[in-house]
Image (cartoon, grey):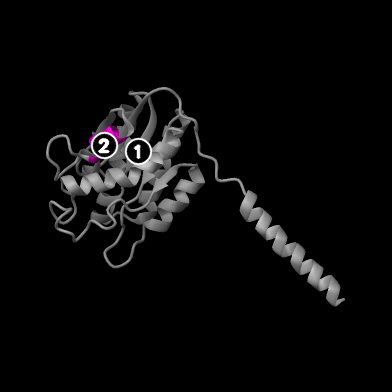
C-alpha cells in the first residue's frame, strides 16, 4: 500500500512538472497582426501632457521600434470618452492599438466596475475589427490599487497583451515628473522603454 502511495505521489508530481513545462501560453487575439498602422489611444498620458514637443511616449516608442506610432491621446478622456472616439480610431484601420485609459475614471470617482465594463467594450470592438490590443495599466488608488488585478484579468480574458502600471517608479520622483500625475521627457522615455519589449512581441520580433 505504501509503495502504491509513493508511486501515485510521484506520478502527480511528474504530471505537474510536465504541465508547467509544456503548458501553452495564452493565445494573443489577432496575432500575427494584419497590415496597418500602430495607434496609441488614450488620455493625457498618451497625448504627452508635460512633455516637450516630440517627446510623448508614442513618439519615443516609435523611434525604438523603427516605425511611426499615431498619437490619438486626448487629455481628460475617460473610458466613456474612449468608447465615443472608437469610430475615429477604427477609421485609421490600425493593426495594433496601445490602449491607455482609466486614470481619469479614478480621478472622477467613476466606479471601477463601470470603468472595466467600458474597457472591455473598447477592446472587444477593436478586436472585432482585427486589431491586436496592448492594454496599458495605470494605478487605481493612492494607498491601494483597485485596478491592477482587473487590468490583468481583462487582458487574459480578451487575449490582449498587457503592460502593468506604466507610471510605476515615476510618481513622486521629481526627476521623472512634470507635475503630480504627468511625466516629463525623462518619464515618458521610461514609459516607452517599459512598453517596448511587449510591442516587439506583438510585432513578432
Q: Position of residue 67 (x, y in %)?
A: 31, 28
Which residue: 14% across, 45% down?
A: 50
To which quarter of the image does residue 78 belong?
top left
Q: Position of residue 59 (x, y in %)?
A: 23, 34
Q: Quadrant of the N terminus?
A: bottom right
Q: Quadrant of the C terminus?
A: top left
Q: Earlier in the sequence, mark 2 or mark 1?
A: 2
Residue 98 numbered mark, or none: 1
Instruction: Looking at this view, name the residue that lies furthest to the bottom.
Output: 2
- The answer to whether 85 is drawn above or below residue 118 in the figure is above
Q: Main secondary structure of the magenta part?
A: helix
- The answer to whether 182 is drawn above or below residue 38 in the figure is below
SS under mark 1: strand
- Neighbor class of circle 2 (other Cα within 10 Å; few <14, some 14-19, many 20+) is many
SS under mark 2: helix
2 on left or right of 108: right
Mark 2 vs 1: CB contact within 8 A: yes
Is 140 part of what is drawn in magenta?
no
Which residue: 27% across, 29% down?
A: 70
Mark 2 → mark 1, Cα distance in angstroms: 9 Å
Q: Looking at the image, which is closer to me, 193 or 53?
A: 193
Q: Is residue 20 visible?
A: yes
To which quarter of the image does residue 72 belong?
top left
- Residue at label 2? 58
Q: Looking at the image, which is closer to me, 156 or 190?
A: 190
Q: Position of residue 204 (x, y in %)?
A: 46, 33
Is 60 part of what is drawn in magenta?
yes
Q: Is residue 122 visible?
A: no
Residue 171 numbered mark, or none: none
114 on left or right of 57: right
Highlighted magenta segment, given as a residue range: 57-64
Amino acid at each position: 500500500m505504501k509503495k502504491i502511495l509513493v508511486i501515485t505521489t510521484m506520478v502527480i508530481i511528474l504530471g505537474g512538472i510536465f504541465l508547467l513545462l509544456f503548458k501553452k501560453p495564452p493565445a494573443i487575439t489577432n496575432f500575427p497582426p494584419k497590415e496597418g498602422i500602430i495607434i496609441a489611444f488614450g488620455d493625457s498620458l498618451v497625448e504627452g501632457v508635460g512633455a516637450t514637443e516630440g517627446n510623448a511616449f508614442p513618439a519615443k516608442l516609435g523611434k525604438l521600434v523603427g516605425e511611426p506610432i499615431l498619437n490619438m491621446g486626448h487629455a481628460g478622456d475617460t473610458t466613456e470618452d474612449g468608447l465615443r472616439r472608437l469610430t475615429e480610431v477604427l477609421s485609421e484601420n490600425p493593426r495594433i492599438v496601445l490602449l491607455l485609459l482609466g486614470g481619469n475614471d479614478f480621478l472622477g470617482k467613476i466606479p471601477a466596475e463601470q470603468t472595466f465594463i467600458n474597457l472591455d467594450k473598447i477592446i472587444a470592438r477593436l478586436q472585432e475589427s482585427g486589431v491586436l490590443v496592448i492594454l496599458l495599466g495605470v494605478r487605481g488608488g493612492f494607498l491601494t490599487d483597485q485596478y491592477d488585478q482587473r487590468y490583468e484579468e481583462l487582458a487574459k480574458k480578451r487575449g490582449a497583451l498587457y503592460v502593468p502600471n506604466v507610471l510605476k517608479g515615476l510618481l513622486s520622483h521629481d526627476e521623472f515628473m512634470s507635475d503630480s500625475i504627468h511625466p516629463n521627457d525623462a518619464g515618458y522615455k521610461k514609459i516607452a522603454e517599459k512598453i517596448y519589449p511587449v510591442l516587439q512581441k506583438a510585432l513578432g520580433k
